[in-house]
């Protein structure tokens, strides 16, 4: 198995926390500049991360996979062949 390929590949499992972190930062910036109500976006992102850790998927992960981003297990399976 080529560890360079599996380590550097963007997968759903790497992109979900990146998207969540970005959304939290955007939410905090919007809450600071405009209104504290933007913190509800942070709560929504946090709930999605909790759901993702429990269920193994979230709406964003399903969308990313449909857009063509591979899952980690897909990369590992193709590396084993």
Image (tube, rainbow, N blue to C red):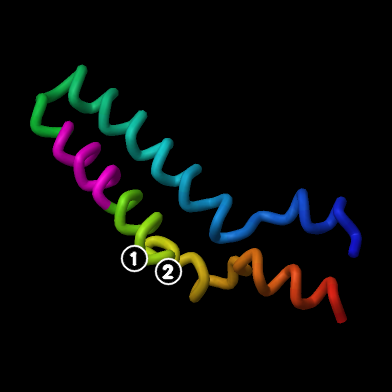
The stretch drawn in magenta includes residue 40: yes
In the rendered structure, the answer to whether residue 76 lies left or right of residue 25 reads: right
SS for tag 1?
helix
Q: Quadrant of the C terminus?
A: bottom right
In the rendered structure, the answer to whether residue 13 lies left or right of residue 61 reads: right
Nearer to me, 72 or 55: 55
Nearer to me, 21 or 34: 21
Q: Position of residue 76 (x, y in %)?
A: 75, 69
Q: Position of residue 73 (x, y in %)?
A: 65, 70
SS for tag 2?
helix
- Cα distance between the residues tagged 2 and 1: 6 Å
> Are the two marked residues, 2 and 1, in contact with CB atoms closer than 8 angstroms?
yes
Which of the two marks, 2 or 1, is nearer to us in this view? Answer: 1
The main secondary structure of the magenta stretch is helix
The residue segment tinted magenta is 39-47
Q: Quadrant of the N terminus?
A: bottom right
Q: Position of residue 49 (x, y in %)?
A: 35, 49
Per the rendering, the mark at residue 30 is: none
Image quadrant in which you'd find residue 43 = top left
Q: Position of residue 13 (x, y in %)?
A: 55, 56
| Residue 26 to residue 78: above or below | above
Residue identifier under label 2: 63
Q: Residue at x 34, y 65 (%)?
A: 59
Q: Residue at x 39, y 43 (%)?
A: 20
Q: Residue at x 20, y 18 (%)?
A: 32
Image quadrant in which you'd find residue 36 = top left
Per the rendering, the mark at residue 59 is: 1
Please, which residue is most extreme toward the bottom here?
81
| Residue 51 to residue 22: above or below | below
């Amino acid at each position: 198995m080529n560890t360079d390929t599996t380590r550097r590949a963007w997968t759903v499992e790497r992109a979900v926390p990146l998207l969540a972190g970005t959304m939290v930062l955007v939410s905090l910036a919007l809450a600071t500049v405009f209104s504290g109500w933007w913190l509800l976006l942070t709560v929504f992102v946090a709930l999605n991360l909790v759901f993702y850790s429990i269920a193994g998927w979230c709406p964003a992960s399903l969308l990313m996979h449909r857009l063509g981003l591979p899952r980690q297990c897909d990369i590992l399976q193709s590396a084993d062949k």
